Amino acid sequence: MLRCLGVATFLRIFDMQNRWGFAIIILSVLILDQASKIAVSAQVGLGESVPVVPGLVHITLVRNTGMAFGLFSAHSIPYKPLLVTVLSIAALVAVAVYALGTPSHNQLSRSGLAFILGGAAGNIIDRIRLGYVTDFVDVFYRQAHWPAFNVADAAICAGVGLLLLDTLTHREPKEAMSQASARES
């Protein structure tokens, strides 16, 4: 099933059984995220909207002072930038500790965690450097808008998707062996 999705090929390219493949994904996400934010910020004014697919996807530069998908952006909380940054760093550390404990043969989970870490690091860099996260992808249909997002957010969502896929397709070795022997009987 994974071969149909191209995931197996992807995992072989990045060889998630070693730390280099893990680091390559994290750095690739981080570089792509920061480069896209710099490029959009240089070309699009704050609040300006540039159609990519008219009526569906625009590039709209916004500043997210809240958490994921703009949660708490409208709230004025004392020390909010510091609080949000500290919470983000704590989440990054928790995911990193979990990733370090993930067995090297569990490639799908390790890939997902690498995407999450790269995305989280990209947004934390914005928070430390700017005091907010630069978002610019605006997806909508008529009056229904998805909160603006960026490459880091997309990588985090992709990472969560890989973790879910791993959970849905993962079999314990003993379980798989007992099913195979049951079929042979």
Image (spheres, rainbow, N blue to C red):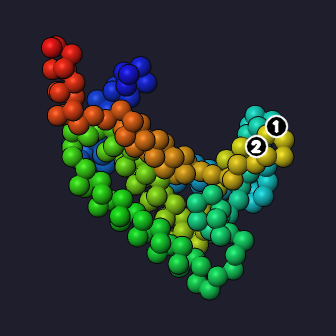
* 163 or 177, nearer to the observer: 177
Give the Cα separation between the discs numbered 1 and 2: 7 Å
Tell me the quarter of the picture where residue 69 sits. Answer: bottom right
Q: Is residue 5 left or right of residue 54?
A: left
Crowd around label 2: few <14 · some 14–19 · many ≥20 (10 Å): some
Residue type at numbered disc 2: Phe
Location of residue 25 with respect to 67 vertically, above or below: above
Question: Where in the figure is residue 121, as x and y percent of width and height?
Answer: 44, 59
Q: Quick one: 36 or 43, which is closer to the camera? A: 36
Are dots 1 and 2 in contact, CB under 8 Å? yes
Q: Secondary structure at mark 2?
A: strand
Q: Amino acid at mark 1?
A: Gly
What residue is rendered at 44% in x and 45% in y?
159
Element class at badge 1: loop
Q: Residue at x 58, y 72 (%)?
A: 131
Is disc 1 surrounded by few (<14), some (14 to 19) or many (20+) residues within 10 Å? Answer: few
Q: If the image is split into quadrants, where does the N terminus sit?
A: top left
Q: Quadrant of the C terminus?
A: top left
**x and y percentages locating residue 95 in the rendered image:** 36, 59
Comparing 149 with 38, the one in front is 149
Query: Residue 55 has which mark?
Result: 1
Q: Residue at x 69, y 53 (%)?
A: 147
Looking at marks 1 and 2 on the same chain, the residue that comes earlier in the sequence is marked by: 1
Q: Residue at x 22, y 28 (%)?
A: 176
Which residue position is annotated with label 2? Answer: 140
**Figure label count:** 2
User: Is residue 43 shown to the viewer in this render?
Assistant: no
Q: Furthest residue to the top?
A: 184
Q: Is residue 28 above or below residue 172?
A: below
